[in-house]
Amino acid sequence: MPVLPRALEIQGEVTTIRRDIHAHPELAFEENRTSDIVAAKLQEWGFEVTRGLGKTGVVGTLRKGNSVKSIGLRADMDCLPMDETNDFEHRSQNAGRMHACGHDGHTAMLLGAAKVLSETKNFEGAVHCIFQPAEEGGGGAKVMIDDGLFEKFPCDAVFAIHNKPGLPVGHIVAKGGPILASADRWDIRITGRGGHAAHPHSTLDPMVVGANIILALQTIVSRNIDPIEPAVVTVGFFNAGSAYNVIPGGAHIGGTTRTTTPQNRELVKRRIDEICEGAARMHGVEIAVEHKPGYPPTVNDVERARFALDVAAGVCGEHAATDKAASRMGAEDFSYMLEKVPGAMVWLGNGGGKDAVSLHNSRYDFNDMAIPFGVSFFVRTVERFLDAGKSA
């Protein structure tokens, strides 16, 4: 088997950690128990431990030799605000909280890699294990960066793993360029003039204006975006009116946009504004648009992704390592780290095939059989990147 023998030997220990974290999920910026576990393990294994970046974030640093070269490995720790419907022994014990995205697995795998690295120290330079809070909407990566993450812990490259249901266990996807989309929200508030439903001519009906805007928004992707470039404009709600015979005075439309390039992200924003400006002039109403930028697109550095793919082939076998995968329209705040440091996020198979339970599902669980592959990938990435005799 191509995975590290030591990764197999500690699989049981790492699984125990993973299931304990799964049973005690914590929301964004509340990962105190999880951070305590992470910090204690890192200290036990001889890492320099720094706490408090991004509120509950933890960074463990291991150094060897005089090389100034350094690498960052990132795992997220927070859970989702939802109830778990599984009935196994390690199911969530905290009502309304669940590790439904595999962050428990990400954290456990990075801890496993830290343990192996502390034992072997088969590298020259510095390894920074970054345990990040608040990926699920809280932007914990950005908060850590704003707290000086890369000033205090300079990295020449940064890598992360995200599990992928449906991809076979033992398979890794590593591709350059955009792999996940931005996730932006927007609000459109229409101020018209309400009145009696029997006298529409004396009103400025915001319902009609809103309906026209919703239809026009659908032309952004179909007529403004290159058909081979993925993009989504989705209206999530349209709130207006409360009575059968009253034309309301206002309406509120809200939605989200997903794009994989900065150029398309700006284009969509501009077209929403232009559509609303035109509708306001055409119908004689007032329209206010508020944009709420979310996570930027997750864009892997091409060279770092090629390096990661080569490492993955050594861990999983060439047949199980690929860069042939379409970008997905979900979002990840690892994107903020990739804006600062060249690196790559890889997808690690969580198994299940076509019947796999998806992320953010109340019956999801991280597959512990994937642990040796994730641990081995992290360790081999460090050893290859910080090999004093080679360059990445």
Image (tube, rainbow, N blue to C red):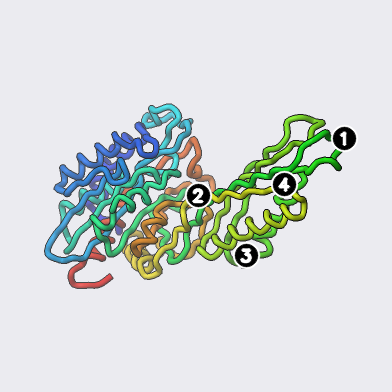
- Per the model, the C-alpha gap separating discs 4 and 2 is 42 Å
Disc 4 on helix, strand or loop? helix
Q: Are marks 1 and 4 in contact (CB under 8 Å)?
A: no
Mark 1 Cα shell of 10 Å, populated few (<14), some (14-19), many (≥20): few
Instruction: Tell me the mark number nearer the camera, choosing from 4 and 3.
Output: 4
- Taking the view exactly as shown, the residue that stands out farthest to the bottom is 390
Left or right of 53 in this view: 206: right
Q: Which residue is mark 4?
A: 210
The residue under label 4 is which amino acid type?
Answer: Gly
Mark 3 Cα shell of 10 Å, populated few (<14), some (14-19), many (≥20): some
Label 1 vs 4, first from the N-terminus: 1
Disc 2 on helix, strand or loop? helix
Instruction: Tell me the mark number nearer the camera, choosing from 1 and 2.
Output: 1
Quarter holding the C terminus is bottom left
Disc 3 on helix, strand or loop? loop
The residue under label 3 is which amino acid type?
Answer: Ile
Q: Which residue is mark 2?
A: 353
Q: Are marks 3 and 1 in contact (CB under 8 Å)?
A: no
- Per the model, the C-alpha gap separating discs 4 and 3 is 23 Å
Residue 28 falls in image quadrant: top left
Instruction: Tell me the mark number nearer the camera, choosing from 3 and 1.
Output: 1
Q: What numbered label is drawn on residue 198?
A: 1
Q: What numbered label is drawn on residue 225?
A: 3
Instruction: Tell me the mark number nearer the camera, choosing from 4 and 2.
Output: 4
Label 4 vs 2, first from the N-terminus: 4
Residue drawn 40% across and 51% down? 162
x, y percent for residue 71:
26, 60
Whether residue 1 is visible here, answered yes or no, is: no
Mark 4 Cα shell of 10 Å, populated few (<14), some (14-19), many (≥20): many
- Per the model, the C-alpha gap separating discs 1 and 2 is 57 Å
Instruction: Tell me the mark number nearer the camera, choosing from 3 and 2.
Output: 3
